[in-house]
Image (cartoon, rainbow, N blue to C red):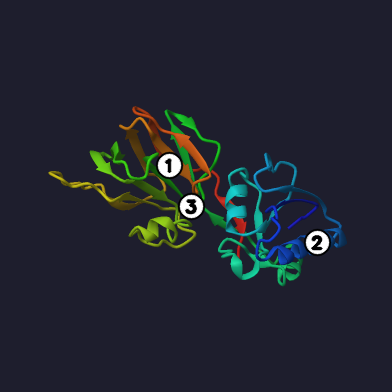
Amino acid sequence: MKLNRAIIVYKEARPGVTGVANHLATLDELYSLLKELGVDFESCKVGQLCSSEGTDLVITVGGDGTVLTTSHYVTDKPILGIKSFGQTSVGYFCGATQKTMRKYIQDLVAGKRKPTHLHRLQVLIDGKPLRELVLNEILFAHALPASMTRYELTVGRRKEEHRSSGVWISTAAGSTAAIYAAGGTPLPITSKQMEYLVREPYYHGKYYRLVQGILSETARIQIRSHVAEGIISIDGSHIQYPAPEGAEITVAAAKHPLKLYWRK
């Protein structure tokens, strides 16, 4: 690929955290490597990236959380995640480590690496699209975990009134994470399908058909909130939006997949 300019997004290193020395060393080596290759770059802390316009590559240094957060603000530029905290970080979405990043970036510049396209979800609340594109999953639930979540769920032509602990909706990339722990089905990571699963449905006197399913990329899921304290959580707990009573949430495939330089 043509690599003239890059943005480095790094996790802030807190003193005393295991792996900080390795993290800082990874950053220093990355800066030196890009200078050696003649690549113009700037860096910012995770969560501070507002736009990836004008860059050829976004490089994250940290772990999966750094990739996830950064992906929300990247539309069509590729991301390379570098795992920098050693064994204390999972790094599932990271393509390189401190030891392998030099060879990886050299191969990337030489055209020997191609990004994997991971399909994402677009969420709308009352017809207004949220800024963040979903890489893993969303959760609709009551703001209080112990409270019942009431809502109307529409999948295709079928519509049901539900009471449960909430609804997971995931991408293929997120199908091995929270939704899988709740009983979902893993999908191939590059699949364009999405998956939904109702958490702990309350069956008292009712039978639900819309409890779990895998849908095509053209499908839409709609949820009408029947709780005043409903919330939507995106890719974890850090990004939340209110979904009060009467709010209509629509989830569909996003137009822009994430271009991720992955391990393969």
Residue 110 visible, this angle: no
Q: Residue 201 carries which label?
A: none
The first of marks 2 and 1 along the sequence is: 2
| In the displayed structure image, the side of residue 125 where residue 221 appears, left or right | left
Which residue is rendered at x = 74% and y = 65% of the image?
21
Q: Which residue is the site of mark 1?
A: 252
Task: Answer few, some or many: residues within 10 Å of disc 2's Cα (few below 14, many 20 plus, some between 14 and 19).
Answer: few
Which image quarter: residue 252? top left
Q: Which residue is the site of mark 3?
A: 136
- For the C terminus, give its image quadrant: bottom right
Which of 255/185 is in front?
Answer: 185
Which image quarter: residue 26? bottom right
In three-dimensional space, the C-alpha distance between marks 2 and 1, rounded to whole angstroms, equals 40 Å
- For the N terminus, give its image quadrant: bottom right
In three-dimensional space, the C-alpha distance between marks 3 and 1, rounded to whole angstroms, equals 13 Å
Element type at marker 2? helix
In three-dimensional space, the C-alpha distance between marks 2 and 3, rounded to whole angstroms, equals 30 Å
Q: Nearer the viewer, mark 2 or mark 3?
A: 2
Q: Which residue is the site of mark 2?
A: 28
Disc 1 marks a residue whose amino acid type is Ala
Disc 3 marks a residue whose amino acid type is Asn
User: Residue 184: where, in percent of width, then height?
Assistant: 35, 58
Do labels 2 and 1 touch, CB within 8 Å? no
Q: Is residue 101 above or below residue 39?
A: below
User: Residue 155: where, in percent of width, then height?
Assistant: 30, 42
| In the displayed structure image, the side of residue 254 where residue 57 appears, left or right | right
The first of marks 3 and 1 along the sequence is: 3
